[in-house]
Structure formats: structure tokens, C-alpha cells
Image (tube, grey):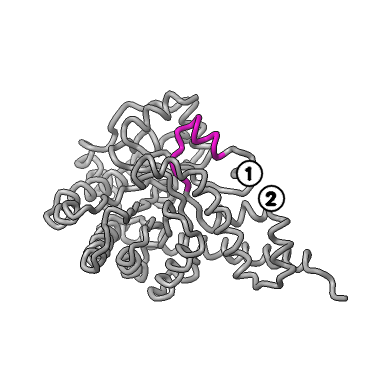
């Protein structure tokens, strides 16, 4: 089961699990995935927590205690989610220590309802970092326009950040700029840059979903031939942008001061189209110094039948640009697609967060002590 995953890891791709639940922690499953499947990190998001807590496994005692204290539903959700992240961070701590903080990370996202509020996002990031209180935590901040200055401010305070919901190449370049600006701010304050880490989560499968919907609507042979090619092309061009930035004088100066590169992270790597190979967004995005965060089904698929053939990204840039140019020639707007994806991404996480609040409130009411 692990040969393909070991090869992937050996190629410089950090394998992270895109899932977390209390049952996964207490059963020892997370530790098993680390030992047997080369998992060296965990990402979470509001949808993951909503599913885990709604399933109920392992949460009743804590919810009962919170109900007895009559805490607000907002506080209850934060206490529950940060407890899971803290415990997962403790399990992954040996990896963090062995890699100098590069891996062994657990990500937790700011309240998605704050995605368009810079000041509130920074305040939430500081609060989450304080609540979890583990050095191997990433605070996830969405790459919205309001999120960009929040990334700079948060990095500038010495808090490590996982930038999420990146769909466009232009926005990705802005994210890398925001990271460097934050490091420059931290450096001016005398902080140790080697202690600050970041990844940039570039979403993959959702890009194909939206482009393919529009290509299918066109229905021409040219359109059909371009289906399921946009996401890989987009991600490969993102890696090209990353290579250009780390070769820049600005980055080189920061690296000499001890700064860590902001690794590209491939997110949303479970295929949405059942006709596609279930390992597509892993085997075709192998490149040095990247992260691939996978749902467990994708992780197991790669371990079972994934074919890792080495670097699948460098050397593909001209072909990748050709794919996006061909799609644009058909009248499909790249800018419109990525805007729709960002808006939908923020809305989906906000909807999941609201569902989580509702289900947690119902449990708090059910378990509240009866009045005498």
C-alpha cells in the first residue's frame, strides 16, 4: 500500500490528510496514517468540522460540559474545534520537530463569515493561535481581497499561515507578495524569520468542475477536447509563478535573513468527475517542495494504485499556457471562472459554518441541565 506514497514523499511532495475528527484522533487512526501512509500534516475547514461534529463520535462529554456552563454556541464551536486541532498537533509534533517546523502541521480556519473583513480576520487569527497554543499550527486565511492584507499582518505578527481558497494565478502572485510583505514587517520588528512558515493552498478539482461545465455547454469537438485539462494547467502555471518568485532578488534577501519558502499546496485533490482517474490530481502534480492534502479516499487510492513517475510539473509550462489560451479562444472567461469559484468557495464554507452552529446549538439545548 505504501510504495507509491513513499515515492511521492521521496519526490518532495509532503502528504497531508484533508480531514480531522475526534474519533480519528482517539482511535489512533491518525497515528497509523503517519506510520503507514507517510502522512505528515492535517488540514481542516468548516465543512470537515461540520461533518465530524454532526456525526457525533466522541463529542458528547465535551458538549455536555459546555451546556452545563451555558456557554454561547460560538464559544462552544471554538472550544470543540480547537481541542481537536490541539490534540492532532500533539500527535504530529514529532514530525514538526524532525523537519524544523516544515511539516507536522495542523491547519484551522478563521471564521469564514469574516472573509471580507481584514481587521476581524487578523483578530481571529491571533485568537486561534492563542487558543490552540501549539507551535505546529497553521491559521488558515482565505485569499480574498480583504484576506491579502490580513495575511501580511498575521505573518508580520509571527503567526504561521495557510492561505486558502486560491483559484487564480493573479491572486496567487498577490498571496506570495503578501507573505513577503509580512516577513519584511516581521524582520523590521526583529523577529526570527526561521520560526515563521506558510503554505499557499491552490485549489485544483473545482477548477475543472467549473471549466468543464462551460465546455460541455459549448458542445463542440474543440470544447470537448479541452475538458478536464484546465485544473492541471492552472496548477502547473502556479508552480511556474512560485519558481519565478523564489528566484527574485526580493525573495533571496528574505531567504538570506532566514525566511522559509511558502510552499505551494495542492488542495481539493479528490476528483469530482467519476470518469477521471481517482489519483489524477496527485500523480500529475508531483513537484519538489510542494504539499498535496488529500481526502482519505484519495490517499488510499494513491497508495493502492497510484503511479508516481517523478516530476510532472516542470517542463510543462508552455503546454499548460496553451490549454488556457485555447479555452479563452472559445470565449470562456478565465477571470469569470475564478471569481465564481472564489465566491462559491467562501459561501460553501460559510454555509457549513452556519450548519455547524445550528447543529451544535441543538446539542447544547438537548444536553443542558434541567432547571430545578
- The answer to whether residue 216 shows anywhere in this view is no
Q: Position of residue 149 (x, y in %)?
A: 31, 70
Q: Are marks 1 and 2 in contact (CB under 8 Å)?
A: yes
- Most extreme residue toward the left, as rendered? 249
Image coordinates of residue 76 in percent, x first then y, are: 63, 66
Determine which of the numbered discs, if any, sits on residue 58 in the image. 2
**Please, is residue 158 above or below residue 26 in the view?**
below
The residue positioned 55% from the left and 48% from the top of the image is: 20
Q: What label sits on residue 18 in the rendered view?
A: none
Predominant secondary structure in magenta? helix
As displayed, is residue 277 above or below residue 118? above
Q: At which x and y percent is residue 214? A: 40, 52
Pointer 1: what residue? 26
Instruction: State the residue at coordinates (46%, 26%).
Output: 2
Residue 206 position within the rendered picture, expressed as x and y whole percent measured from the top left: 43, 50
Judge by depth and name the residue closer to the eye, 120 or 231: 120
Residue 195 in view here? yes
Q: Quadrant of residue 176?
A: bottom left
**Neighbours of disc 2 within 10 Å: few (<14), some (14-19), many (20+):** some
Image vertical order of residue 85 relative to residue 280, above or below: below
Q: Which residues are magenta?
A: 30-42
Amino acid at each position: 500500500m505504501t510504495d507509491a506514497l513513499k515515492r511521492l514523499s521521496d519526490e518532495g511532495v509532503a502528504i497531508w490528510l484533508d480531514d480531522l475528527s475526534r474519533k480519528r484522533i482517539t482511535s489512533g487512526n491518525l497515528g497509523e496514517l503517519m506510520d503507514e501512509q507517510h502522512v505528515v500534516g492535517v488540514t481542516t475547514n468548516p465543512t470537515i468540522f461540520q461533518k465530524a461534529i454532526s456525526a457525533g463520535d466522541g463529542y458528547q462529554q465535551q458538549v455536555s460540559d459546555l451546556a452545563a456552563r451555558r456557554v454561547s454556541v460560538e464559544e462552544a464551536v471554538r472550544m470543540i474545534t480547537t481541542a481537536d486541532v490541539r490534540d492532532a498537533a500533539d500527535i504530529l509534533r514529532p514530525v514538526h520537530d524532525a523537519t524544523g517546523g516544515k511539516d507536522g502541521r495542523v491547519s484551522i480556519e478563521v471564521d469564514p463569515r469574516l472573509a471580507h473583513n481584514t481587521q476581524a480576520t487578523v483578530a481571529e487569527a491571533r485568537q486561534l493561535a492563542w487558543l490552540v497554543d501549539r507551535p505546529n499550527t497553521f491559521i488558515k486565511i482565505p485569499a480574498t481581497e480583504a484576506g491579502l492584507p490580513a495575511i501580511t499582518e498575521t505573518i508580520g505578527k509571527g503567526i504561521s499561515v495557510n492561505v486558502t481558497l486560491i483559484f487564480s494565478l493573479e491572486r496567487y502572485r498577490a498571496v506570495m507578495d503578501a507573505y513577503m510583505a509580512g516577513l519584511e514587517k516581521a524582520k523590521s520588528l526583529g523577529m526570527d524569520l526561521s520560526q515563521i512558515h506558510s503554505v499557499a493552498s491552490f485549489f485544483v478539482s473545482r477548477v475543472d468542475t467549473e471549466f468543464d461545465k462551460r465546455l460541455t455547454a459549448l458542445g463542440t469537438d474543440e470544447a470537448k477536447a479541452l475538458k478536464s485539462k484546465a485544473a492541471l494547467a492552472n496548477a502547473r502555471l502556479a508552480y511556474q509563478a512560485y519558481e519565478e518568485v523564489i528566484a527574485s532578488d526580493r525573495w533571496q534577501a528574505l531567504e538570506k535573513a532566514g525566511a522559509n519558502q511558502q510552499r505551494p499546496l495542492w488542495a481539493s485533490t479528490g476528483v469530482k468527475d467519476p470518469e477521471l482517474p481517482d489519483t489524477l490530481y496527485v500523480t500529475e502534480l508531483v513537484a519538489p517542495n510542494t504539499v498535496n492534502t488529500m481526502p482519505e479516499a484519495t490517499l488510499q487510492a494513491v497508495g493502492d494504485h497510484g503511479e508516481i513517475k517523478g516530476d510532472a510539473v516542470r517542463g510543462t509550462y508552455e503546454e499548460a499556457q496553451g490549454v488556457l489560451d485555447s479555452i479563452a479562444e472559445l470565449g470562456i472567461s478565465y477571470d469569470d471562472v475564478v471569481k465564481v469559484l472564489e465566491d462559491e468557495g467562501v459561501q460553501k464554507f460559510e454555509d457549513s459554518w452556519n450548519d455547524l452552529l445550528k447543529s451544535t446549538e441543538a446539542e447544547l439545548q438537548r444536553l443542558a441541565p434541567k432547571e430545578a
